[in-house]
């Protein structure tokens, strides 16, 4: 009887722990490349914003994907299978993020065009119509950095590389309010 109670208690404990990790978490295969790259709708991308603290960024990303760690930058590589991958670089000044660069390496230019369209729609809905010149899209928004605006720049570099390649760079510029 005692063994039976231990067995039942163990099953209840395991199911309770397991249910917390599985509920409302989409399987990796269920996410689109856009969703993998964006990761979180908080912040500007992957849950991060310019001005984010070093320790916060480390918590937003997965240790298993970390390829470079220094006091100046954190770099993560994510393999999405089928020769698709995401490279994310956070550059720090002091203890806060000053630049975020995300590169998507995709199997085809058609796939890059589709993912670029997803990002264009997403950022345009959040921040309005982007400035556009020669295939580069730029959105301006507020950031956590004092006296600065954040610029989100999306470039489709597929034609230059001969495969699907998107680059998203998020960087600060002094705001007009601080120049006055």
Image (cartoon, rainbow, N blue to C red):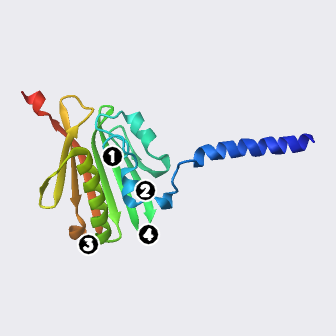
Please give the residue where the numbered disc 2 appears in the rendered image: 78
Please give the residue where the numbered disc 4 appears in the rendered image: 82
- Give percent across and percent down for residue 92: 30, 38
Residue name at image x 27 percent, y 61 percent: 117
Cα distance, mark 4 to mark 1? Answer: 23 Å
Mark 3 and mark 4 lie on one chain; the one further toward the N terminus is: 4
Element carrying mark 3? loop
Mark 2 and mark 3 lie on one chain; the one further toward the N terminus is: 2
Cα distance, mark 2 to mark 3? Answer: 21 Å
Location of the C terminus (image quadrant): top left
Cα distance, mark 3 to mark 4? Answer: 17 Å
Location of the N terminus (image quadrant): top right
Mark 4 and mark 1 lie on one chain; the one further toward the N terminus is: 1
- Give percent across and percent down for residue 75: 37, 48
* Front in this rendered view, residue 14 or 93: 14
* Mark 3 crowd level (few <14, some 14–19, many ≥20, 10 Å Cα): few
- As drawn, the label of residue 45 is 1
Cα distance, mark 3 to mark 1? Answer: 26 Å
Query: Would you identify the image quadrant in which residue 59 lies?
Result: top left
- As drawn, the label of residue 113 is none
């Amino acid at each position: 009887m005692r063994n039976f109670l231990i067995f039942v208690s163990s099953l209840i404990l395991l199911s309770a722990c397991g249910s917390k990790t599985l509920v409302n978490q989409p399987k990796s295969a269920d996410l689109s490349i856009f969703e993998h790259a964006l990761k979180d709708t908080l912040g500007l991308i992957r849950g991060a914003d310019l001005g984010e603290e070093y320790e916060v960024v480390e918590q937003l990303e997965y240790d298993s994907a970390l390829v470079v760690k220094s006091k100046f930058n954190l770099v993560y590589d994510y393999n999405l299978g089928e020769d698709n991958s995401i490279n994310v670089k956070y550059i720090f000044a002091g203890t806060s993020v000053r630049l975020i660069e995300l590169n998507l390496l995709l199997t085809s230019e058609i796939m890059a065009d589709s993912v670029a369209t997803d990002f264009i729609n997403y950022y345009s809905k959040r921040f309005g119509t982007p400035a556009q010149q020669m295939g580069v899209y730029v959105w301006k928004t507020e950031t956590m950095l004092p006296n600065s605006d954040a610029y989100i720049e999306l470039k489709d570099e597929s034609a230059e590389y001969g495969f699907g390649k998107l680059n998203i760079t998020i960087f600060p510029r002094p705001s007009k309010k601080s120049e006055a």
